[in-house]
Amino acid sequence: MVINFRKLNRQVLPFKPETKQGFIFIATNEQKENGLFSIAKVGSKRSLMTILVDTINSDEDFKREFSI
């Protein structure tokens, strides 16, 4: 399955106010009700996306939410 990176990128935001220290994936309220969760990672956006791709590929709820 192909991952919808456009949808995924909209939910990845920099930490505030220290934007260079890390990024966080923000789960919406609807996603939280379905068992999805927010993920924070110190470091680059690329490293967070790597973790999210692994999570999407291994978790059925994430796969259903972010597949095209």
Image (tube, rainbow, N blue to C red):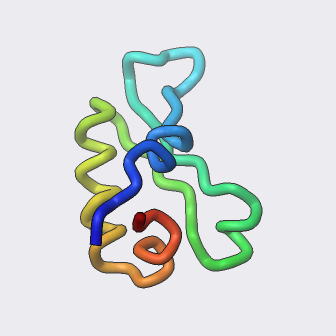
Q: Residue at x 69, y 56 (%)?
A: 28
23 shown above or below 17 = below
- Establish if 34 lies above or below 5: below
Residue 12 in the image: above or below residue 4: above
Return the x and y of residue 55 as percentages of the image width and height: 33, 68
Q: Is residue 49 left or right of residue 25?
A: left
Residue 48 position within the rendered picture, expressed as x and y whole percent measured from the top left: 32, 44
62 left or right of 34? left
Left or right, 17 with respect to 68, comes to right
Q: Residue furthest bottom?
A: 60
Q: Residue at x 38, y 23 (%)?
A: 21
Which residue corresponds to the image point at 58% horizontal and 15% vertical from the top-left?
A: 17
Residue depicted at x 74% and y 66%: 30
Residue 61 percent location from the top left of the image: 50, 79
Residue 27 screen position, x and y as percent: 61, 56
Query: Which quarter of the rendering shows the C terminus?
Result: bottom left
